[in-house]
Image (cartoon, coloured by chain):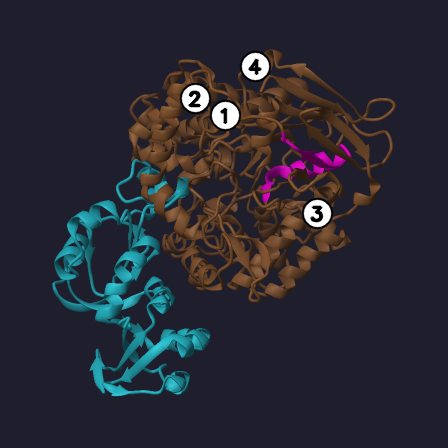
């Protein structure tokens, strides 16, 4: 990946593309690339939907190689949801394809002078940008079918649905999976709205005639990759639990812990949890059968295969296996325990192009505001359809929980930096609350992942049983996540094998070094992680954020959560210490 | 009819095609009753009373809840009358790692960790509830189903109604209180007021 593709959508005479060398951005991938460009080139006070914002799409550092699990892609911009810097990432095929085509990033800049929609086609011969207003308000599924018909059966797409075109703050960007379905999304923070503001409906990629990226040391790379795959396969989470049940294996466990936010974070256990659990879902999918039903990868080179395919009662494809966060957001958080109904909503979310976490949290807030009854699956489906149609109510909902709560006079809105909290109540698991509060991204469960700072041997000895130990853990996890998964293109779920198996962690370091020809140590990687977080936080401060934005909503400190009757007790002073490094 | 704790208890025995056994895992996940010797540690209950191998407990059961609180030390957490014990494999996600028993991120959920300080414990026989989740239900579930699990009739009623089609198609033989029983009559029986000792065995392949 030796070049950056910049497309000025506001150029006189129509959008203009140019490629340029990496320059200051050499060696960066994924989140390090997106946040690096946004922090340096986007005015922090600009309007997120204006011409000065930029949308950066960057494959991971190892994407396009044959390294297992390296197919994640990052999307960055100033977020229309949070008003701060944003990195959202996704699986799917485009990351590997852009890597093979040599692009370390695509940067969409400016704004079209006319209100038009464009499609961008990229292959080994270059870039073609065409105006195509016939794509207006197409759902992602129809859009991809149309692109395949036009550009061939082997292409893959990066696209937005109607929500992105309507510039909704919950709008996502879709990435096609191995079956060319738009099921993988960079969901968080309204990145789809920024793509919509640039007038880009789809980026179509054809990597025919390209080869996998070559490592600097092929022999060492091959050996490290073999060790890496073996480590992932032998671990009970990556080798057994995730392939068998998917991420939704968490439903029963989080519910048992009393940390499962139910009916808009009002209690910590949902009586219908077992009906929508990963165990029940896998059993249903296996019974209905069909290709890739209960175990499936989201991109080539995935060996964990935590996904699956959800077929309806009649055996027709409906959507991908519903992820834990989605199952919770549209399930327990809305009091709904109907697997088929939740799968239908997931399909609608993907088609309209909205973040499933934000939509589920928003509908729950709307339910608390009296728009519908908790537990009413049909009403929830209809509310999502309102978003797709862009009705006045749909426009409110499509702009997220914070806006919806304000419109309907709801006091209890579970957001940080206006982004909805995911599927873990921070009163029961306070450590996750520290991450929700202090990550530059807004409430995000993936920002501080379980990559072993302890294993990396940096940051000093941590006593996790003391409050200061929690702060240190949360800090180190955020730093490690920023570099080890978000920037390499590695799937987050590698974390468990790394955490438990030092030889597997070493295999990853060897893999990175053999590919890049560098000799990174754990300290080097942590230093890069710190640099990413510092530049993101600096952007946010320049955009007007203060320490007061690193807080959970007040009611988490006041309202005890059943069954444990606990509140969030981490002090503001302690939260302010998280990024004191 | 037998009684357990004064509650009428029916014995329902099902012989089913092997592929049907996993549908009963849902009942094990929701929780089943167990008559056990209480006042002992979680480890004693699981290994000495239920016959779970110590290596299995150490290596496979990585997340343990006692009354919805995470157990970090199976030797010091005691089981008492009415306790609810849930067993799970290692979980994904940051929170999955945080919830792991004795894990390095245990401090991040200190408010819901099981605390043995000041806990009293009475010896004797009493009823507890056991839940098997994910890999644990897959691996231990078939044996416990063969031996029989004690469940509330109301849960069985709901289960039968929701899975009747599967039961009609893949249930080979039914016995109620030791006597043959028509499969079609399963949803008509009054289960709600009873406890049910449910035994599920796979049919032998001829």
Instruction: Indicate which disc, 1 or 4, sits on the residue closer to the N terminus.
Output: 4
Is residue A365 in sight in this rendering? no
Q: Which residue is mark 1?
A: A62
Q: CA distance from mark 4 to mark 2?
A: 15 Å
Q: Which residue is mark 4?
A: A26
- Determine the chain carrying the residue at label 1: A
Give the number of the mark in front: 1 or 4. 1
Q: Is the same chain shared between marks 1 and 2?
A: yes
Is residue B81 in sight in this rendering? yes
Q: Secondary structure at mark 4?
A: loop
* Magenta segment includes A198: yes
Q: Which chain is brown?
A: A
Q: Are marks 1 and 3 in contact (CB under 8 Å)?
A: no
Q: Which residues are magenta?
A: A184-208
Q: Is the same chain shared between marks 3 and 4?
A: yes
Q: Is the same chain shared between marks 4 and 2?
A: yes
Residue A376 sits in quarter: bottom right
Q: CA distance from mark 1 to mark 3?
A: 29 Å
């Amino acid at each position: 990946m030796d070049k950056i593709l910049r497309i000025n959508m506001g150029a006189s005479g129509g959008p203009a593309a140019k490629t340029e060398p990496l320059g200051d951005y050499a060696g960066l991938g994924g989140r390090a690339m997106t946040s690096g460009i946004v922090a340096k080139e986007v005015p922090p006070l600009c309007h997120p939907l204006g011409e000065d914002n930029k949308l950066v799409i960057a494959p991971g550092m190892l994407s396009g190689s044959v390294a297992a699990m390296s197919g994640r892609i990052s999307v960055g911009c100033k977020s229309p949801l949070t008003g701060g810097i944003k990195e959202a990432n996704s699986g799917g095929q485009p990351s590997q394809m852009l890597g093979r085509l040599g692009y370390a990033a695509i940067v969409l800049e400016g704004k079209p002078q006319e209100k038009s929609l464009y499609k961008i086609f990229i292959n080994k011969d270059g870039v073609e940008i065409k105006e195509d207003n016939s794509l207006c308000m197409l759902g992602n599924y129809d859009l991809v079918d149309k692109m395949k018909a036009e550009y061939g059966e082997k292409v893959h797409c990066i696209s937005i649905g109607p929500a992105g075109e309507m510039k909704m703050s919950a709008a996502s960007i879709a990435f096609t999976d191995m079956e060319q379905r738009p099921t993988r999304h960079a969901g968080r923070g309204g990145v789809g709205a920024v793509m919509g503001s640039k007038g880009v409906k789809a980026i179509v990629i054809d990597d025919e005639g390209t080869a996998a990226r070559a490592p600097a040391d092929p022999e060492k790379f091959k050996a490290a990759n073999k060790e890496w795959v073996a480590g992932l396969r032998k671990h009970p989470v990556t080798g057994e639990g995730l392939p068998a049940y998917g991420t939704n294996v968490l439903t029963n466990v989080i519910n048992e812990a009393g940390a499962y936010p139910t009916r808009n974070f009002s209690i910590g256990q949902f009586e219908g949890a077992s009906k929508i659990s990963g165990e029940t879902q896998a059993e249903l999918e296996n019974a209905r059968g069909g290709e890739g039903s209960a175990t499936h990868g989201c991109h080539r080179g995935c060996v964990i295969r935590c996904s699956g395919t959800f077929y309806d009662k009649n055996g027709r494809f409906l959507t991908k296996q519903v992820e834990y966060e989605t199952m919770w957001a549209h399930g327990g958080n809305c009091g709904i325990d109907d697997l088929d109904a939740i799968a239908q909503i997931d399909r609608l979310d993907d088609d309209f192009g909205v973040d499933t976490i934000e939509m589920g949290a928003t509908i729950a807030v709307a339910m608390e505001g009296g728009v519908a009854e908790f537990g009413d699956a049909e009403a929830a489906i209809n509310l999502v359809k309102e978003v797709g149609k862009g009705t006045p109510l749909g426009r409110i909902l499509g702009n997220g929980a914070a806006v919806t709560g304000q419109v309907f006079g709801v006091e209890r809105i579970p957001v940080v930096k206006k982004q909805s909290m995911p599927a873990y109540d921070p009163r029961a698991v306070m450590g996750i609350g520290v991450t929700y509060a202090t990550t530059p991204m807004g409430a995000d469960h993936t920002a501080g992942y379980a990559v072993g700072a302890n294993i990396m041997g940096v940051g000093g000895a941590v006593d996790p049983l003391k409050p200061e130990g929690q702060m240190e853990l949360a800090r180190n996890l955020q730093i490690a996540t920023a570099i080890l998964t978000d920037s390499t293109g590695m799937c987050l779920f590698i974390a468990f094998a790394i955490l438990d198996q030092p030889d597997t962690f070493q295999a990853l370091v060897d893999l990175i070094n053999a590919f890049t020809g560098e000799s990174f140590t754990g300290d080097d990687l942590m230093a890069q992680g710190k640099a990413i977080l510092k530049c993101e936080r600096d952007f946010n401060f320049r955009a007007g954020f203060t320490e007061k934005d690193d807080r959970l909503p007040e009611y988490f400190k006041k309202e005890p959560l059943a069954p444990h009757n606990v509140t969030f007790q981490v002090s503001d002073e302690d939260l302010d210490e998280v990024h004191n490094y | 009819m037998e009684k357990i704790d004064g509650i009428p208890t029916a014995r329902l025995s099902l012989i089913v095609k092997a592929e049907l056994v996993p549908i009963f895992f849902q009942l094990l996940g929701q929780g089943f009753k167990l008559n056990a010797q209480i006042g002992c540690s979680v480890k004693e209950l699981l290994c000495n009373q239920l016959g779970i191998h110590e290596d299995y407990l150490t290596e496979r059961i990585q997340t343990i809840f006692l009354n919805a609180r995470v157990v970090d030390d199976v030797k010091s957490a005691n089981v008492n009358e009415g306790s609810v014990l849930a067993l799970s494999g290692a979980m994904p996600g940051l929170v999955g790692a945080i919830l792991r028993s004795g894990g390095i991120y245990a401090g991040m959920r200190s408010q819901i960790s099981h605390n043995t300080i000041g806990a009293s414990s009475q010896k004797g026989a009493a009823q507890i509830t056991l839940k098997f989740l994910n890999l644990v239900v897959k691996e231990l579930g078939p044996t416990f189903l063969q031996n029989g699990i004690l469940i509330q009739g109301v849960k069985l009623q709901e289960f039968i109604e929701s899975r009747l089609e599967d039961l009609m198609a893949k249930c080979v033989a039914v016995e109620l209180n030791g006597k043959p029983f028509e499969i079609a009559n399963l949803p008509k029986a009054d289960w709600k007021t009873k406890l049910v000792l449910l035994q599920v065995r796979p049919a032998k392949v001829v």
